[in-house]
Image (spheres, rainbow, N blue to C red):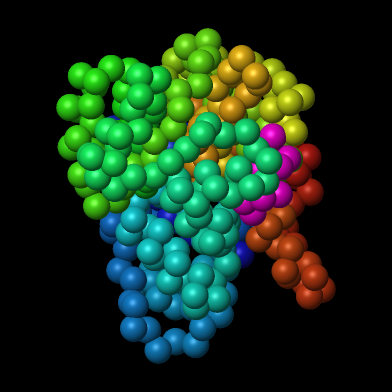
Amino acid sequence: MRLCFITVRRVPDTPSPLLLDVSRLLERAGHDVRHERAEDMVFTVTSRVATGPWCDCLASGPADLYLLKSHTELALSIAGALHDRGARLLNPYPACAAAQDKVRATAALHRAGVPVPATQVVAGHAAAAALFRGTPLVVKPVRGHRGAGVSIVSTEGDLDGWQALADTDGGLLVQDLVDGPGEDLKVYVVGRDVWAVRKPFGPDSFTRPGRPVAVDPEVGRIVERVSRTTGLSIYGLDIIEGPNGPVVVDLNYFPGYKGCVGVAEPMARHIHEFAVRRDDAAGESAPAHVADLLAGVP
């Protein structure tokens, strides 16, 4: 089957080691795998080709399954157009679109009983400033990623730096600061496999691997609820271990899995099983060497 990863330009501009390993395993299983950056794609919006899983909108040709790794607005738009034409995506486009919007994501998690901070959304500095009553707040862009634009407001003086963010068109999420140990718990999920690492939060924390830790049963229950609620199966959670238990402060589809050990094989297995599910249901055989892939035989 033809699989296409929709990727993003990395800094530094080198391929993701994880995606390279996953791609090699999928290729050994008989799949044709390619990686395309959304910003380098030629996508024919007005294509007359019939809709369906093989919609031919990309100059590089169609794919049986698209895997949305990039979080740019262009990549999400292209994924949405593919979804509207009947293409198959992993994660599903509606789940990615909801996760990218922190207002929708936080509201959905709260409705499902997932612990999240008390949250409000504002669009201007005056409204944002009115929320500060001396208790520390966390402020983040509605559509931010990798911690960009996240600020802690602890004093009235911090409000000055907040104004530039609050006056943007996208609005801001304002959350109560959760007291924690000074480190975030990063939880990474692929299907039913879960990893966790701890690392200090900071502007460049996404570049650091952190240190692996065991997955607490309470965190495992949160993961089950998030998977069921969001429709995501390849995703990450940022959790603060507060005085009343773990609290989810961010959700991202297809994260980087930095610091996690042994992700490539479970991810390749999960992608393969999703890709061939429809073919197997129709009575078609899976690609050659799948048994070896799933058993981890070189």
For residue 78, side relative to residue 285 (left or right): left
Q: Quadrant of the N terminus?
A: bottom right
Residue at 44% from the left image edge and 63% from the top image edge: 79
Q: Eyeballing the image, is 280 above or below 85?
A: above
Residues in magenta, as a range: 222-233
Which image quarter holds the C terminus? Answer: top right
Residue drawn at the location 58% of the way across and 49% of the way down? 108
Residue 278 in view in this figure: yes
Observer-nearest of 63 and 128: 128
Residue 29 is at least partly visible in this image: no
Give percent across and percent down for residue 99.
Answer: 50, 49
Q: Is residue 38 above or below residue 182?
A: below
Q: Which image quadrant for residue 160? A: top left
**Residue at the (45%, 46%) spot, across then down:** 102
Residue 69 vertical position relative to residue 83 in the rendered view, above or below: above
Residue at image point 18% right, 37% down = 164
Closest to the observer, 259 or 279? 259
Query: Residue 203 at what x, y percent from top left?
Result: 32, 24
Image quadrant where residue 21 sits: top right
77 inside magenta stretch: no
* Residue 231 highlighted magenta (yes or no): yes
**Percent of width and height locating residue 158:** 24, 21
Image location of residue 162, percent across then percent down: 23, 31
142 in relation to 115, above or below: below
